[in-house]
Image (cartoon, grey):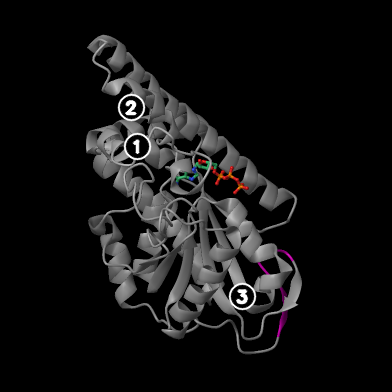
Amino acid sequence: LKSVIMRNANFEKSGIEKASTSSTLATNSVGFTQNQKNKTKVIFVMGATATGKSKLSIDLATYFSGEIINSDKIQVYEGLDIITNKITEAEGRGIPHHMIGFVDPNRDFTVDDFCRHALQNIDIISKKGKLPIIAGGSNSYVETLVEDSKFKFQDNFECCFIWLDVSKNVLYKRVANQVDEMVEAGLVEEVRGMFVPEADYTKRIRRAIGAPEMHDYFMLEKDTNINDSTKNEKLAHAIEEIKVNTCMLVDSQFRKIQRLREELGWKMHRIDATSVHEKCGKDAEDEWMKEVLEKTITIMDEFLK
Ligand code: ATP
């Protein structure tokens, strides 16, 4: 990130809050011809889980003086920080994040709630002269925000969609490693803390991948009539299920993004981060700079011009 931060020192902030002040007709990011006058510019960082959306959005917010609005419908809830993969304070690098962990886990948070809060936050961020960056994996929520006529999004905002993509086989391996890291970080203890035998896994935060999968294990964990090896097998099975279900989430997120591109005509800038995930350590960092960050910055420079 060093060279990026050096470039950042020379970066001019003008042009972020509002689009061109001249009244020109142009094709906007979602593919419609509209008057671009006085539209606030908004960045979307989209992509499947585990691709690196959080890191990219934090790098972009650092470079372009932005703030991040979370668009993951499970991360909006307070709690279950490990299984929902919320960023840590260190990973956040001081960049303000909005709409993370702010909803009571016993309340519903609807897609309309998401849209209203997102609009409020875009307004607050842009009035500060900062760039709003919406990042997260809940594509149906983002679709409603941009497409539902009652929110008039396309009348008021000019969008740049960044799609961080990673080839499926590489991403599945990353998902498996990430679940193992979550287990090391205390996944079992975290989910046990919320466990109740009569839990409803169709609602609110308990929909999070990792909660329903652990249910059967917790049901027999305390049973003294069941031997340890049976318990360990049940736990291993639950962890395997978490991996499989997260890969299924990856597939469904990929399909939704394809739909936004192909059926709704959203102009997505696809950034391929596969090579980053195939490398480790310093090599991965260098690859990230070259293949992901530099390319995204070029796209955004053009958009913010
Ligand atoms: P819709 O597309 O209508 O919003 P959906 O809830 O099936 O429906 P997804 O966002 O694809 O849409 O999520 C699928 C499921 O994956 C969720 O219901 C939830 O169980 C799980 N899930 C989604 N995001 C996360 C997350 N960040 N952490 C853990 N589990 C998640």
Front: mark 3 or 2? 2
Rendered location of residue 303, percent (x, y) = 55, 71
Q: Residues within 10 Å of mark 1 (few under 14, many from 20)?
A: some
Q: Which residue is mark 1?
A: 195
How many marks the image carries: the answer is 3
At 29% from the left edge and 63% from the top edge, which residue is drawn? 3
Q: Is residue 106 or residue 83 the one in the foreground?
A: 106
- Tag 2–tag 1 contact (CB < 8 Å): yes
Rendered location of residue 255, percent (x, y) = 63, 41
Q: Which residue is mark 2?
A: 218
Tag shown at residue 157:
3
Q: Mark 2 or mark 1: name the one nearer the start of the chain.
A: 1
Residue 16 in sight from this viewpoint: no
Boundaries of the magenta span? 24-31
Q: Does residue 305 appear left or right of residue 61 in this picture?
A: right
Q: Residues within 10 Å of mark 3 (few under 14, many from 20)?
A: many
Q: Mark 3 or mark 2: name the one nearer the start of the chain.
A: 3
